[in-house]
Image (spheres, helix red, strand yellow):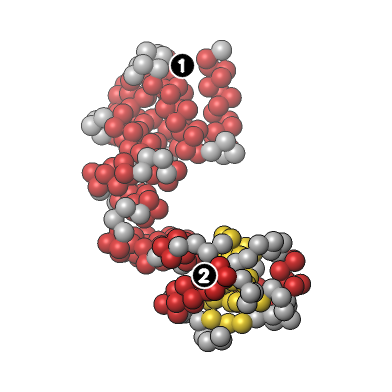
Amino acid sequence: MTTGAVLDASDATFATDVIERSHELPVVVDFWAPWCGPCRVLGPTLETIAHERSGEVQLVKINVDENPGIATSYQVQGIPAVKAFRNGEVVSEFVGALPEPQVRGFFDSLVPSAADQAVAAAEHALRIDQPGAARLHLEHALEQDPDHPRASAALAAILLSDGEIARARELASRFPGDPAAARVLAQLAFRDEAGEEPREALEARLEANPDDAEAHYRLGCLLAAEGEWRDALEHLLATVRLDREVADDGGRLRMLDAFTLLGDGNELTRGYRQRLTNVIF
């Protein structure tokens, strides 16, 4: 059977029908044979779902008796064998006649949801410096899937930069294990530690008394929350040098938090980690 959604392919056409096509959309390959009972059970289920997802997924059927070359190349030892291709590579597979709900789940894993597509659009908008457009895409993603981790974390980061602290905290707190959400929560923690005293007041305190360890700590946390990492680390290091008891060794701990956010390869991390070690030891 060959239709737009279901295609019979061969050893000769595999490169075009599967490998090249998989750069445009996911391709599910059904390795089967006419004598195979489980293949006759699974085949109609695959074809039904492929028709339902026409334009989103391509189903390609390979008769292994007539096309042993491809079956051997992909180490097909038992049939039915189903392999999903994306960008020329196998990304998922199973063997045997699975129940229809599991087959549907297999297809679902290959096709981005509406929320996934909205997040991808948001990520593109951020790459071209359009945070407003990104925010609209992310809001749409959460309308489609309120529990989407990537959308929640990405929107939390934008809200934080826009000063919408309460909602940023709520979204990031849903998925604290997500790296992007963890970064937002860390920045919020810096903000919490900074307290309510405005930047100008903290700077005035330090001008009057450069050895005010608490002012160094609060200002360092405030600057970290705003992403001014070099000055933040300088003030936090001053806190460590002046008084380790401020916020229960908060200067050192917040520096470690900053290193985590910046990453081990960051120049500031390398430089200030060494300076912190020199101060402590």
Point out residue 265 in the picture as x, y percentages from the top left corner. Answer: 59, 39
Q: Nearer the viewer, residue 262 or 96?
A: 96
Vertical position of residue 95 compared to residue 180: above or below: below
Q: Nearer the viewer, residue 249 or 99?
A: 99
Residue 128 visible at all: no
Residue 42 - label: 2
Residue shown at 75%/73% (left/top)? 68
Point out residue 217 in the picture as x, y percentages from the top left corner. Answer: 36, 24
Residue 133 - label: none
Disc 2 marks a residue whose amino acid type is Leu
Vertical position of residue 258 compared to residue 170: above or below: above
Which image quadrant: the N terminus?
Answer: bottom right
Neighbor class of circle 1 (other Cα within 10 Å; few <14, some 14-19, many 20+) is some
Q: Nearer the viewer, residue 89 or 32?
A: 32
Residue shown at 40%/13% (left/top)? 243
Point out residue 66 in the picture as x, y percentages from the top left corner. Answer: 72, 79
Residue 247 visible at all: yes
Disc 1 marks a residue whose amino acid type is Arg
Q: Nearer the viewer, residue 190 or 218?
A: 190
Residue shown at 36%/63% (left/top)? 115
Point out residue 151 in the picture as x, y percentages from the top left corner. Answer: 36, 55
What residue did someone put label 1 on? 241
